[in-house]
Image: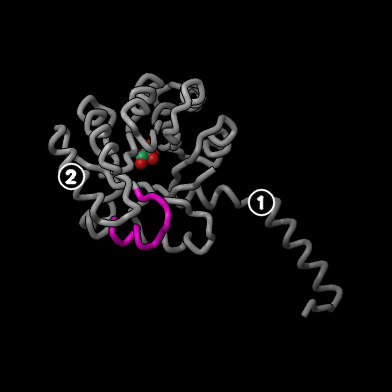
């Protein structure tokens, strides 16, 4: 499973890169706003930090505007993925940009039929928002399951990018139901490897080792 970091905070990202487990990055207009940076500067810097796909979201809502912004964002770096919302214009622009060779991440997906249409429009990634569905009393993971089945039934190669993942449990469940990738905030990345029993166990081993008076080297 590919792990993407959902952030425009380059400092937080830089701290995770040495782990070798960051496969890509996703951003959205809210995350860019939070960073206080110009989108072109933030995306260019992030693209230089990671080899994998970096999603940069267009904010135009009309077809021509989406194309213009998508083409601009695509030019920022070879690993830019243009993110477009799941609207009629977004799907139409997804097809055009995909045909031009630009990978598109279709975002704000909340239903299986939306995901089906994104795949038909040539999307490289579909981003179902599992956390926001859970927030609204629905079952985000069930949506991932449905999309997996539909894509497998018809051989669509659009990658399922579990988005709005808020907990390590979300990542585990998304992996169990076959999502190709999950995008998570840096805090969730850390929560994936931290475990109290690991810490307690390590401390006990170190205490016992100290009693031996040995050193390995
Ligand atoms: O980038 C899209 C998504 O991951 C947003 O997550 O937590 O704002 O619902 P959240």
Indicate which disc residue 145 carries. Answer: none
SS under mark 1 = helix
Q: Is residue 50 above or below residue 153?
A: below
Q: Is residue 206 above or below residue 136?
A: below
Mark 2 vs mark 1: give the one in front: 2
Which quarter of the frame holds ligand 1? top left
Q: Is residue 78 above or below residue 90?
A: below
Give the residue displayed 28% in from the left and 29% down from the top: 86
**Residue 114 x/y as whole percent:** 34, 23
SS under mark 2 = helix
Q: Which residue is mark 2?
A: 69
Segment colored magenta: 43-54
Indicate which disc residue 196 carries. Answer: 1
Colour scheme of the picture: one colour
**Residue 33 x/y as whole percent:** 24, 50
Quadrant for the C terminus in the image: bottom right
Give the residue displayed 34% in from the left and 28% down from the top: 118
Give the residue displayed 80% in from the left and 78% down from the top: 215
Q: Nearer the viewer, residue 98 or 116?
A: 98
């Amino acid at each position: 499973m590919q792990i993407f970091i959902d952030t425009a905070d380059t400092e937080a990202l830089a701290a995770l890169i040495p782990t070798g487990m960051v496969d890509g990055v996703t951003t959205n207009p809210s995350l860019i706003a939070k960073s206080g940076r110009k989108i072109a500067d933030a995306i260019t810097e992030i693209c230089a930090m990671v080899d994998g796909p970096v999603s940069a979201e267009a904010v135009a809502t009309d077809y021509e505007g989406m194309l213009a912004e998508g083409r601009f964002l695509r030019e920022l770096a070879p690993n830019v993925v243009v993110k477009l919302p799941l609207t009629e214009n977004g799907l139409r622009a997804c097809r055009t940009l995909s045909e031009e060779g630009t990978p598109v991440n279709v975002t704000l997906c909340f239903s299986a039929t939306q995901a089906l249409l994104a795949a038909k429009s040539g999307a490289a990634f579909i981003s179902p928002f599992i956390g926001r569905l859970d927030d609204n009393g629905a079952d985000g993971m069930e949506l991932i399951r449905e999309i997996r089945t539909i894509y497998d039934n018809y051989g669509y190669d659009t990658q399922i990018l579990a988005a709005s993942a808020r907990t390590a449990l979300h990542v585990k469940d998304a992996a169990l139901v076959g999502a190709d990738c999950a995008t998570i905030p840096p805090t969730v990345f850390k929560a994936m490897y931290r475990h109290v029993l690991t810490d307690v166990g390590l401390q006990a081993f170190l205490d016992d080792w100290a009693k031996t008076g040995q050193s390995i080297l």
